């Protein structure tokens, strides 16, 4: 409930802006970086992350005004899985398909079917 004065008038809260910007991984719900300064980047801006050098993309700009210390500028970003040492799910699928193809080729060679190219019927002209 908003605070009011003795006359029932709404009291506008005053909050100081913290002197940093929080870069926040939106998907994993964890902080990535704290910039010492307030930097309101636009949605779509790219941030080069340190170690490993990967790109995070700004998805949302938020002002968190609910803290006791003051308001915080937060940039919600999309971070590549490799930054956290994770393997990308799409890459996992590609690797699994490649491993399956290699296994099939090795079986075909072992069975004496060295020609892995599909046969194409040739019709006389």
Image: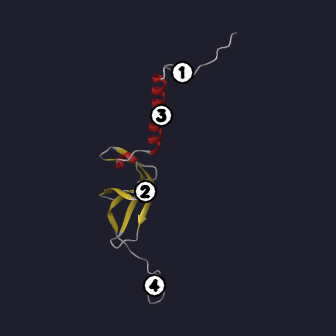
Check disc 1 and report its element: helix, strand or loop. loop
Check whether the beta carbons of the residues at disc 4 and disc 3 lie within 8 A of each other: no
Q: Position of residue 85 (x, y in %)?
A: 35, 47
Say which quarter of the image contains residue 52: top left
Q: Position of residue 76 (x, y in %)?
A: 42, 57
Tell me the residue at 37%/58% (across/down): 30
The answer to which of marks 4 and 1 sits earlier in the sequence is 4
Marks 1 and 2, Cα distance to the nearest angstrom? 46 Å
State how many labels appear.
4
The answer to which of marks 4 and 2 sits earlier in the sequence is 4
Count residues near mark 2 (Cα–Cα under 10 Å), then give few for <14, some for 14-19, many for 20+: some
Q: Is residue 86 above or below residue 21?
A: above
Q: Which residue is mark 1?
A: 117
Please state if 71 lies on the left or on the right of 2 as rendered: left
Marks 4 and 1, Cα distance to the nearest angstrom? 80 Å
Check whether the beta carbons of the residues at disc 3 and disc 2 lie within 8 A of each other: no
Tell me the residue at 37%/45% (across/down): 82
């Amino acid at each position: 409930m908003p605070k009011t004065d003795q006359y029932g008038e709404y009291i506008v809260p005053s909050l100081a802006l913290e002197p940093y910007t929080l870069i926040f991984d939106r998907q994993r719900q964890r902080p990535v970086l704290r910039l010492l300064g307030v930097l309101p980047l636009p949605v779509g801006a790219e941030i080069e992350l340190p170690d490993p050098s990967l790109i995070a993309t700004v998805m949302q700009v938020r002002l968190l005004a609910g803290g006791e210390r003051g308001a915080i500028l937060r940039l919600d970003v999309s971070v590549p899985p490799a930054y956290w040492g994770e393997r990308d799910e799409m890459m996992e699928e590609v690797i699994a398909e490649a491993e399956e193809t290699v296994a099939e080729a090795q079986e075909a060679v072992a069975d004496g079917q060295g020609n892995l190219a599909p046969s194409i019927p040739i019709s006389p002209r």
